[in-house]
Amino acid sequence: MKLSVPLRCTALLLLLNSFILPLSAKQASGWQIRELPVKASLRSSAATAQSLWVAGSKNRVYISKNNGKTWSDISPPLTTEHDFRDIAVLNENTAIIMSAGEGSQSKLFITRDQGKSWQLLRENHHKQGFYDSIAFINEQTGFLLGDPVDGHFVIEHTRDQGKSWQRVNPEHLPAIQENEIAFAASGNTLLADKNKEIWFTTGGLSAFVYHSKDLGASWQKQPLPLYQKTKTAGPYALAFNSQNRLFALGGDYLQRDGVYQNIAALKQGEWQSLNSGQNGLRTAMRCIKNICLATGKLSTDISYDHGHSWQLFAKQGFYTLAGTSQSILAAGAEGKVAVFTPENFSHFEADN
């Protein structure tokens, strides 16, 4: 499900070249914030040891090779406008970006040379289809989550780096409730790990997490203790802390600053609400050792105990987070990107 105004395809020819962008920077509550020249809505991010990637509306994709100090525009030269809502970086040269939208507006593109060239990898041809998130276990094996088609969520998988995709048997997925949807908010609706486990989360007058331990062959479904009183409410993201504990985050994008339960954690097989401060919609979470950040468009929370308790960190917020063992990348509205380094904080447990 898309969360902003409907995507309008245009006939504009975008003349995009890769170059290093001069950026304005300012320090704000621990964030080193930079503003990219194009005021795109950046809802997807990824990080490796050598590069940072962000992507978003207006066909925009950027890469940084110096931890966010400068950024190169590597956007694909498309003739219609796409809204990129997720990105999977498979190695230092190869990345897949996902555009969201109804029917054929949902597409996958791949680069194998750090954005010097792009190829269309997959296009959704079902009029009810809507891509929400992608996640890869390794360079070859990945999964794609889409809105319900024929009464079940669409889960597709690839074993050849996206060259071919097969839908997981929808009859193996639990039944959906009325108004149940997935949110394409930050590239965090779907998770997959090296143990071949997969999770995705859904909302819309409900809040659920789906879990498969066998690459999608079978599924379990659990309710989440998150705000779910409207059709635009529920979980917007999943994340692991550094202790490999699973968290769910959410709220309502029409009430971004609302006071409601917005973070839950899986403990001994049961989902439990946390002391989160209830500071509004949260769409992404990232941890480095004991320090975790949870963010939404309007503000960011911080935890010093692996995500078990939270407090307001900054009135600066973002849509999406990614990170390495050293720093956390954030991207958000109006082309804002930022890097946070927890070693600057006295609460950081360097040996944990």
Image: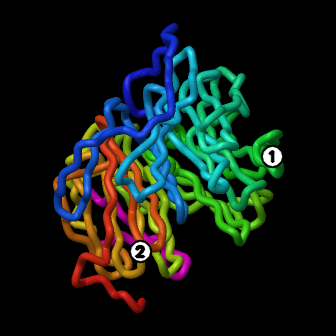
Q: Quadrant of the C terminus?
A: bottom left
Near mark 2 (Cα within 10 A), the count class, few <14, some 14-19 or many ≥20, is many
Tell whether position 151 is magenta.
no
**Left or right: 168 as drawn, with respect to 339:** right
The correct choice, above or below, for 93 with respect to 248 in the image is above
Residue 43 in picture, x, y percent from top left = 43, 42
Residue 125 in picture, x, y percent from top left = 71, 23
Residue 169, disc: 1
Say which residue label 2 marks.
288
Residue 269 in picture, x, y percent from top left = 55, 77
Rounded to the nearest angstrom, the CA distance separating label 1 from label 2 is 37 Å
Query: Observer-nearest residue: 64 or 135?
Result: 64
At numbered mark 2, what does the secondary structure look like: helix, strand or loop? strand
Q: Residue at x 49, y 48 (%)?
A: 53
The answer to which quarter of the image holds residue 137 is: bottom right
Q: Which residues are magenta?
A: 260-275
